[in-house]
Image: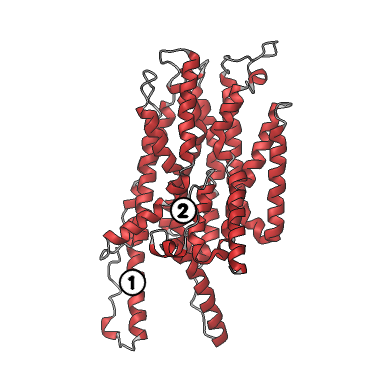
Amino acid sequence: MSGLIIKRIFWSFGAVAELFLFSGVAFGFPFIEYELKSEGIFYETKCSNGTDDIWGPGKKLCNDALKLYNTLFTVAVVSCTIGVFLTGFILDKIGMFWTRMFYCTITTLGYVMMALYTSNELLLFPGLVFLAWSGLAYLVINNVCVSIMGRFAGVSVIIFSGTTFFMMPYAMPGKEWAEGNFLRSNIVSKCQKVGENSEIKEEKSEKNEPEKEKIPLKESCLNPTFLLFATVFVVYSTRVKALQGWIYPWMEWSYAKVPGDGAEIEAHVGNLLEIYGLLLFASPLFAALPELFSWVGSKLNRNGILNGDMISLTIIMSYSAIACSVCSGQMMYRAKDLDDNANAYALIVIFSIAKTIVYAAPNMFLFYMFPPEHFGSLYGILTAPGIVTMWFIDPLFRLILGDSESLADADFAPVSIGFAVLCGVGLVQVFLPKIGLIPAAKRMCRERQIQSERTNEESHGIDNKGFELEKSEDMF
């Protein structure tokens, strides 16, 4: 076994362990909230009203305490978004080693503060802010280094992304499997093309050949398809993050008025939350769905204009719009009894897939539609609006609670209807003429096909003047 292979094995296991332990804390907030509520955290801060009223088992938290839990989640989500946005800039300024040292220090401070929450409940805020800030940075840092995995680079990206949601249930595949199956599609080939392009660039520099003129970043930023995608992604990502923070309160609200003993209802809600938690362990499989769609699309559409990758991206964006809209509608339904679980089960499954799929879409969109050198900048531009929109999670939850005295009297309908409409309208982005995803993908595929044909003709010495296309050809 060569030294390079040993290094790859150690690095990949270290990356998986790091992501497993440190990257997904903010995403597990419903479970943190469940444990904190079982200890009555924030009861004395918000519910005692300066009296000697002390929390005890079985006591319900007041709405002011519930609002504080949602504020805690909102602050963590915003911190996570800012952390991801700044990671690339920090990495460029101080390098890999000091970037890791910086984020490891932040993570350590976060865990120390979280461990001291019993002495002061408000330490939960800086603790979770630090953990959320550094959490996804580990994913970004490890994906920057993923090129050392060679032909397994694309597979590693999928594994690391899935591990961020707490688990990696399958091992790294072997060479024959990776070369013969659907995971070896454009993400893997894209990683290989980066290496090929660098080699070609070196050869050109040796021969003093002029390089092909690069597309300006401004042109990519002002691309109508990019701007439209950025708009709908902000809506979908805000819906997903809001639902991640509200799914446990929604479960409590949904069963709050069903006939039955309070302890029995609480245990039933706990079981539903456990099912949701178990599905997090399937996140690596959900992360592989885009590649599966790409492989199936390439097999079923051999002679079509769109390639498998574009078909996969179209399916993902369509599912994101439909799933976010459907989940929003489902949150308006209240269970009639403890056996009325179909809606809750369906929401858990649909959302568990959607929260992974939604965040796979930007990577695919930028990889396939824009120059590789623009990826980092465009991804930062895509995530930047989330720094603002994520703040709306807190006031929206306060709107849900309203002036009600308990969570059972809250009203999820207005906010859910708003999200359902916004996400449903986002489906237009896939089919909108000229600037929509499908028309833009068709145009790009045709342009690449034309360029490929011209390259083949020139390489075979064929005079292609008689085959030139009319400039007025409709590329849509």
Tag 2: amino acid: Pro
Residue at the (44%, 26%) spot, across then down: 412
Q: Determine contact: label 1, label 2, CB under 8 Å.
A: no
Instruction: Tell me if 393 is positioned left or right of 118 in this view.
Output: left
Marker disc for residue 362: 2
Packing grade of label 1 (10 A; few <14, some 14-19, many >=20) is few
Q: Quadrant of residue 465?
A: bottom left
Residue reaching furthest right?
119
Residue sitting nearer the eye, 79 or 283: 283
Query: Is residue 422 at least partly visible in the picture?
Result: no
| Residue 308 image point, x, y percent | 34, 60
Quarter of the image where one finds residue 183: bottom left
Mark 1: which amino acid?
Gln
Q: At which x and y percent is residue 390?
A: 54, 39
> In terms of depth relative to the viewer, which is nearer, 298 or 393?
298
Q: Secondary structure at mark 2?
A: helix
Label 1 – label 2 distance at C-alpha:
24 Å
Q: Is residue 122 above or below residue 309?
A: above
Q: Is residue 172 visible?
A: yes
- Residue denoted by label 1: 449
Is 191 drawn above or below residue 293 in the view shown? below
Q: Residue at x 46, y 45 (%)?
A: 356
- What kind of element bears circle 1? helix
Tell me the residue at 62%/48% (across/down).
83
As drawn, the residue found furthest toward the top would be 52
